[in-house]
Amino acid sequence: MWFLYALISAFSVATSDAFAKLAMRKAGINEFFIIWLRYIFAAAFLTPFLLTVQIPHLSSRFFMWHLLWIPAESVGLYLSLKALRISPISLVGPIMALTPMFILFTGWIALGEVPSMSKVPGIFLIIFGSFILGTGRTRIPFGRMIHEKGARLMTATAFLYSLSAVAGKGMVIETGPIFFGIYYAIVMLIVFTPLGIANIGGDIRKAKFELLMAGLFFAFTIVSHMMAVRDANVAYMIAIKRLSGVFSVIWGAVLFKEQEIGSRLLGATIMVLGAFIIAVA
């Protein structure tokens, strides 16, 4: 059952991003407002779960992790929405598969988790997949990823998420995955409320449906993520969730009529396979 939950989480995050991009395009809405709205939905869905979990002891180490987690997660969220606004979702969405590769190094530094040689094939597959994804018709190796601003922003996001993932893992060890999933949504809502209110703008009426879908699917992402983590090896679950990159390419074709879909789908699939090898090796 965990596999189904992980697959739902992958589909939901890609779908939330696609509707967020539509909303920004149709109504001229700021990235901070989109992030805030998504956490309103997530917190509304998840807060009732507090009644079903035991509140753990929150140690000083748990709060120390916040020094890394909140800045990396917050800036990463903003950059990812910025990338989605200015670049094709079929290009920038799959770049998130770089995160597991970065985690090999950030986890080594922050948690002392030494990477094993068995993960090297996964690294090569991610690099090869990103080569296919990022080169496209430019005939310049990684040309799209170098010259497309959104691709550069999403690469930075993938690195920042590797930092927040390492901090999040440390916090999950302290508290447990279910509690932390709820805590995550509430804290991020608090962080982004001032920024969201300050950046309310655009014609929201033009994108009411898109905003509703972006918020709902973001809530589904976190709920299904929690359910999957409860029943499965976290590394396996995250590897399946990286299929979000493939779903992003599909949404790019269906909703935005983007180009180079074939090569991007191939590149995204290879990157997901590399992420899976890193997770399970």
Image (cartoon, helix red, strand yellow):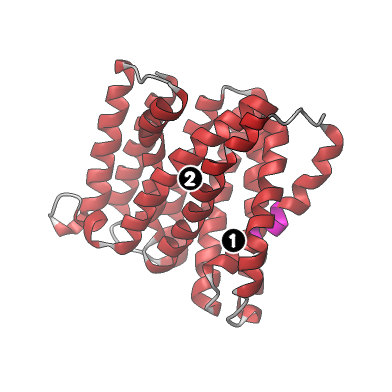
**Residue where numbered disc 1 is placed:** 35
Label annotation for residue 78: none
Looking at the image, which is closer to me, 193 or 233? 193
Q: Around disc 2, counting alpha carbons within 10 Å, would you say few (fewer than 14), some (14 to 19), or many (20 or more)?
A: many
Q: Quadrant of the C terminus?
A: top left
223 to 200, vertically: above or below = above
Does residue 253 lie above or below 72 as drawn?
Answer: below
State which tag comes first along the sequence, 2 or 1: 1
Quadrant in which residue 52 is drawn = top right
**Is 105 in the magenta?**
no
- Which mark identifies residue 244? 2
Question: Is residue 1 something that shows in the picture?
Answer: no
Secondary structure of the residue carrying tag 2 is helix
Q: Which residues are magenta?
A: 38-42
* Disc 2 from disc 1: Cα separation: 18 Å
- Identify residue type, mark 1: Ile
Residue 53 at x, y percent in the picture: 81, 31
